[in-house]
Image (cartoon, rainbow, N blue to C red):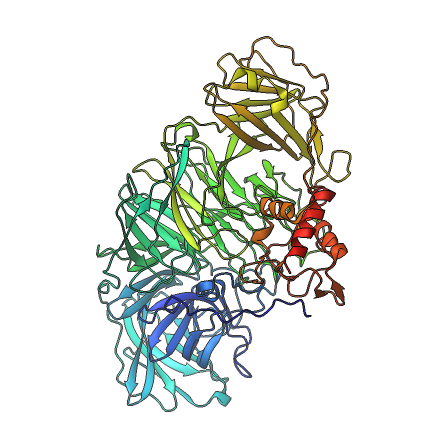
Amino acid sequence: MDARRPSQAPAAPSPWADFVEPDFPFYSSVLDARALGAGWPDDNLTPRGLVLNLGHDLWACFDTDLLRMSAIWQGAGVTPVSMAPLSYHNAGERSPIGQGRLPQVAGTAWLATGLYPGWQAGSAIVRADPRPPAPDAAEPGRGPLTRDDGRFVTIRQTATGVALEYVVHGTTIAEQMAVRLEGDRPVIERRIRVGARPTALSLVVGARPEAAGPFSAIVAGSDAAALRREPDGLIVVRVSAGDAPIDFTVAMSPGTAPAPAPELFAATGPPQPRWPQTVTTRGSLSTSTDAFVVDRLQIPDANPWRRNVRFADITFPSTDRAALVTFDGDVWTVTGLAGSLDRLVWRRFTSGLHEPLAIVTRGDDLFVFDRNGIWRLEDTDGNGEADAHVLVANTFAQTAETREFAMSMRIAPDGAFIIAKGGLLGGTRGRDNGSVLRVAPDGSSMTRLGWGLRQPFASVDPRTGLVVASDQQGNYIPSTPLHIIRDGQYYGFLPESQPEARYPAPITAPLAWIPHAVSASAAGQVWLRGARMGPLNDDLVYLNYYRPGLLLAHLDTSEARPRAAITSLTNDMTFAPLAGAVNPADGQLYVTGFRIWGTDAGELSGLARVRYTGAPSTIPRDVVATDRGVLVQFDVPLDPIVAADPANVSAERWNYQRTPAYGSPHFKLDGTRGQDALTPSSAYVTPDGRGLFIGVPDMKPSMQLRVGWSLATADGHRFDGNVYLTPTELPAFDPVARGFGSINVDLTPRAATTTIARPVTAEEGQRIATRMGCLACHSVDGSVTGRVGPSWRGLAGSDRVLAKGGTRTADAAYLRESILDPTASVARGFDQADAGMPSYAGVLTDAEIDSVILYIQSLR
């Protein structure tokens, strides 16, 4: 039996219309046109492309970095293999890591250009890339030209299509593309308006090998524009210098020359609304009596356009309106996000963006971060739809690496953009992969705040400007971290293409580690500044994608070495949260996200409100590890008898190891695998009942400290909780300063509480697998779509074809080895997954592993 991913049963018909909407004039994509054939440019890769739908099955791709028309073709757009279109109809499908399978021309090429600027000064065409090379010189994704050489400005929707606006060597240029028919023959026209130009310019129209057949082009409209062909057939238009703007048109078609009657550039107003209909939904209020509850809001997935809705981020341009961006390039607006949520009115705002994951508001302006850059979306005629996408910044590089996502964007107090870029590299290295960058408010410059990140989401405190980020556990990232990002520091990730464990700079340790079982895959963060969330006001919320929920990060940056304590806020999420924002209308937290893979979320996408009810909160306000134990501050008074009993508190600690392996086992402080159990010896309560100090003998620095409790409030409400810290330093505990008065902390060792052994059964194995999040990666029904590991259905006893050759039978020994050393015998087809499996050595006991094996064996 082959252990490759099994073929799936035929999928049910998709409820969604096509990813590329036929009546929208453009979309965005990578375009790999390096394999068009003999005689075509063999370096023609466009990481940042605007694909123009010209009608009549004709398409053109404009490279916004090099300001060139990288290809013109007839057919069906580009092959739908990039992440958004591939997963659009079948959630869980994903592109391979790296650049080995990229979108290509789906049709017959008319013209193409090489990897050099599409407009150049003077008459001679330099067929070389003038941009500084990336860290890997072979990487073509080098970012834009210098601002002196050229920059893209706007793609503007018009009544007849789109206009592209850009600047070349100080000259403003606008162009439209259109198709006219000469009988049955389509003719493409590039209608170009060139402003005053201090120097002559050359436009590279494109090349075509003789074997592709005859091709003709003419220029009309201005004597200042003249067409010529280079000896190898490259078509060029030379534009002479001049003080007055000119209009000219390049008309082109296979075969004989087009008729000399082309139209010229014509400025027209915005189009009529494309999506005048609205979609009305409603919210469902939680009936829970907890302090913080989750209200669910119905998203507009039942819409007239049969458009899939996979929300990635939310912002609030005004107190009565929110805007949400989808991974598929759309922006929606919605009103009604306050109060009872009984009438939510949705409207489509724009489309065509390049796998965006972030949307923000600055003043009255709305910005989206996608793979092409940072765009300002403008509704110039006030009809409720954007008609101009203004490229504010693309100064950073972008490769075609499928995992170099536009991860996140937030606004700093001075108006700068803080962006995070994906860094999981399966190919050549770009300049800015895996970085957090500060982009100037006007987009003209950038500063690298941090690098060496695997897949970061970053945020910035809108009050202080402090930048923090999550990252994804994986190779060189032993567990999920929370980082402070600053000073261009390096954070420890290395791509597989680099020599093992040869770090290019000192590694900056995180503010806190979070265990894999708590947060296997983290997402964005939200600062609750200006919120009306009761005791959570001004705190940092940390979103948990893998096991959908929200964590709370208690930060203390007042000391020389900042610290953080991580606790759970809610696990009541039915979708995988990616980002959130505080609504100025009600001061509550709104969270959104969608699922592709690596999460046990049940819903494809969702929107929720986390609402403060006013009920007492048992979430700790602060937790500090000290030299004599752990201090926990609550917002409610505790039952003093329950709290003063150290038997109601537990603690354990462990370390991780940063290695090329995925994740890390747990290690005791003596280096053996496992966790050090710590038995509290005493507990003390402040006179107001809100402070608890837990005396713990033998406190030492560690990478991970867990403290758990089972307590009661003064009015008898029982509650449990856990907190996770990274105590690299242990300050002296001052009981008087902390409100405990003059006490002597008893650190006399106390006998450990006997733990009742749980049975070794398949049922216990199912419970453990659920608790550890195993079922987010492994299905139990035979399916593999959306999973990063093999299905457990039928796994036991099967013959596994290994990625490194040979076969193994999945007996108990193989399953145990896979749990303890997941890289030892990886099955073919699962060796290039985004999310690998960490070792559970030192994490699970032998008995727990036995139970998991029994559970897998039961899934015959």
What's the residue at 61%, 29% (across, down)? 707
Q: Is residue 828 above or below residue 570?
A: below
> Is 507 placed left or right of 361 in the picture?
right
Depth check, front residue: 503 or 790:
790
Which corner quadrant holds the N terminus?
A: bottom right
Counting labels gives 0
Between 481 and 634, the one lying in front of the other is: 634
Residue 750 locus on image (x, y percent): 71, 20
Q: x and y percent of residue 619 in the render? A: 49, 29
- Residue 746 lies, with reference to residue 18, above or below; the image says above
Q: Quadrant where the C terminus lies? A: bottom right
In the image: residue 20, left or right of residue 33 = left
Residue 417 visible in rendering: no
Instruction: Determine the residue located farthest toward the top in the rendered image.
Output: 742
The residue nearer to you, when weighing 303 against 566, is 303
User: 597 or 121, which is in the foreground?
Assistant: 597
Residue 685 % position (x, y): 55, 15
**Image quadrant of residue 480?**
top right
Residue 612, horizontal then vertical, whole percent: 38, 33
Residue 570 makes an appearance in the image = yes
